[in-house]
Image (cartoon, rainbow, N blue to C red):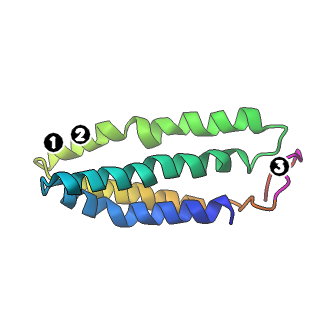
Amino acid sequence: MGRKPVNIAILLVLLVFSAPAFLLLNTGDAWLIALVCAVGFVFAVEGSISALSPMFAEPFGSRYRFASVPLARECFAVFGGGIAPMICSELLSQFTGSFWPVAVSMIVMAGISLVQLLGIPETRDHDQLTGQDAR
């Protein structure tokens, strides 16, 4: 199947689920909150990590893979995840506690990720032992 279709499906779920998740959390119903947490962890955390980790390494040839993956992943994780809590805190304070700006920021980040994902090569049939990058 390849990593790209799996990642596209995960991002589409996150695009659709972001706003309803906040609505369900605001109900105060323990079962709905548990559902949001379960779906969020399955798709946002476990799904993304399990599908993205090999996809980060596969586009790079075996010669540069060890240096390229940490550079690409860790340096840009600062922007994607490191400052996200600060941005969300500021959005909450600027919009008097409303969750909508945070939900919109999540949707925007998932949309940017989806657009970026569409531009990278599918590596399903790429020989991972070769020194050449996937194209």
Residue 17, percent across and down?
A: 34, 63
Task: Determine whether the residue tagged by mark 2 lies in a helix, strand or loop.
Answer: helix
Question: Contact, CB < 8 Å: mark 1 with mark 2?
Answer: yes
Badge 3 or badge 2: first in the primary sequence: 2
Query: Dot 3 surroundings within 10 Å: few (below 14), some, or many (20 or more)?
Result: some
Q: Quadrant of the C terminus?
A: bottom right
Say which of marks 3 and 2 sits in front. 3
Q: On the image, numbered disc 1 is attached to which residue?
A: 93
Query: Dot 1 surroundings within 10 Å: few (below 14), some, or many (20 or more)?
Result: few
Q: In the image, which residues are magenta?
A: 126-131
Task: Determine whether the residue tagged by mark 1 lies in a helix, strand or loop.
Answer: helix
Disc 1 marks a residue whose amino acid type is Ser
Residue 72, percent across and down?
A: 62, 39
Question: Contact, CB < 8 Å: mark 3 with mark 2?
Answer: no
Residue 95, percent across and down?
A: 14, 50
In the figure, is residue 109 to the left or right of 8?
A: left
Q: On the image, numbered disc 2 is attached to which residue?
A: 89
Say which of marks 3 and 1 sits in front. 3
Magenta stretch containing residue 129, yes or no?
Answer: yes
As drawn, 119 above or below 71: below
Q: On the image, numbered disc 3 is attached to which residue?
A: 128
Magenta stretch containing residue 132, yes or no?
Answer: no
Disc 2 marks a residue whose amino acid type is Ser
